[in-house]
Image (cartoon, rainbow, N blue to C red):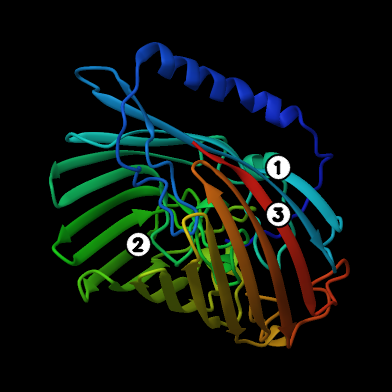
Amino acid sequence: MSMQHQPINVFGLERFFRLAPVYVFALLLLIMTGFAKADPMSMPAMSGPLAANANPLALDLQDPLGKIYVTGALTGLGLYQNNASPGNKEWIADLSNGQVFVQKIDGPVQFFVQAGEYAFPSLGAGYLRSNDTVSATYGAVPQAFLKLVPSSNFSVLIGKLPTLIGDEYTFSFENMNILRGLLWNQEPAVSRGVQGNYTSGPLTISLSWNDGFYSNHYNWVSGLASYAFNGGSDTLAFVGGGNLGRSGTSSSATPFVQNNGEIFNLIWTHTQGPWVISPYLQYTHVPADSLLGIARGASTIGGALLVSYKLNEDWKLAGRAEYISSSGNGALGAPNLLYGAGSDAWSITITPTYQHKQFFVRAEFTYVAASGETPGLALGPTGTDTNQSRVLLETGILF
């Protein structure tokens, strides 16, 4: 998901205190009502190295609701960057997640609701603070859906859904790294719509009718097919999505050009002992469309390697390497998909992580470089710099 606007507000603790009653209320409610231990929740999905609370709290509301689980993430980050984007400073501190997750995970009717504040820090893009991100993108409830489960191998989701596309999730605590990558910047993050899921042994198939990059025009179809083999230690997934019509919507959550295109991923995930290795390929294409003012088509092709290694029960190390190339000629009317039509970029990210029970702290070191850029559309305060380095620290609790 592309973030092009970087308004900046004065950071203050008032946002922490504004969210504090939510957590206090949830804790008091759990104490008064009673709670039970359960397995870690499947939502929000997490790729590691961070792990969800292994013993989430559960409200036993009896029939007809049964157990309702309440979990959450309260995290903050600080970063230093050179060649900062317009509206950004070299030093930034922010609340990266202040969220509560409420869900029912059994029975024929289930649900998931995610509420609070969040930020989407990503490589090679300006940082948008969490309170601005909420108002500019998906609101105070970024994901919420009803889940109908008529059988053990089939389900239907209806609502604000996490995207099927890509190998990195939307929120920072879900991923191997704090910053989402260059390939993530090309992908939708949250879509409104309906999604069917079918599983049969090692095979999983999902198909969704949705509004793509949160456009409120329901003309996107996306799908996923994955197959697990080698005893489940390897999974190969093919993912794709595209706009079947056209949409003129443009906002911080809806990049006009990408929302009128198509995107495909081939993702392999290998797990062995302390290792998680996940390389993936991505292809995107935006066709020419005179009605939308797109004179020439353009594409991107890229690849990424995500790796995580478990050093011991508390310490893990993750890394990511990426390369992405865009096609097209801006002078002939091709759209900008990266740092100007025909530009390329690569990145490297290293993220050591410490987690003990619900508390975690992790550092991150990133470098991104562009080439073939169009002056004014690249990095830095004037869009003419070709590289950016960042050092980050994120800490918090996953309760």
Foreground tag (1 vs 3): 3
Mark 3–mark 2 CB contact (< 8 Å):
no
* First along the sequence among labels 2 and 1: 1
**Dot 2 alpha-carbon crowd within 10 angstroms: few under 14, some 14 to 19, many 20 or more:** some
| SS at circle 2 | strand
| SS at circle 1 | helix
| C-alpha distance separating marks 1 and 3 | 21 Å
Q: Which mark is residue 360?
A: none
* Res. 209 image quadrant: bottom left
> In the rendered image, which residue does mark 1 sit on?
132
Q: Is residue 6 visible?
A: yes
Q: Where residue 173 appears, x then y in whole percent?
A: 54, 51
Q: Is residue 378 visible?
A: no
**Dot 1 alpha-carbon crowd within 10 angstroms: few under 14, some 14 to 19, many 20 or more:** some
| C-alpha distance separating marks 3 and 2 | 37 Å
| C-alpha distance separating marks 2 and 1 | 29 Å
Q: Nearer the viewer, residue 44 or 285?
A: 44
Left or right of 248 on screen, residue 159:
left
Q: Where residue 76 appears, x then y in whole percent?
A: 67, 44
Q: Quadrant of the N terminus?
A: bottom right
- Please state which amino acid type lies under the numbered disc 2: Val
Foreground tag (2 vs 1): 1
Residue shown at 84% from the left, 39% from the top: 10
* Res. 244 image quadrant: bottom left
Q: Nearer the viewer, residue 85 or 89?
A: 89
Q: Which mark is residue 393?
A: 3
> In the rendered image, which residue does mark 2 sit on?
221
Residue found at the far top of this picture = 32
- Please state which amino acid type lies under the numbered disc 3: Leu
**Dot 3 alpha-carbon crowd within 10 angstroms: few under 14, some 14 to 19, many 20 or more:** some
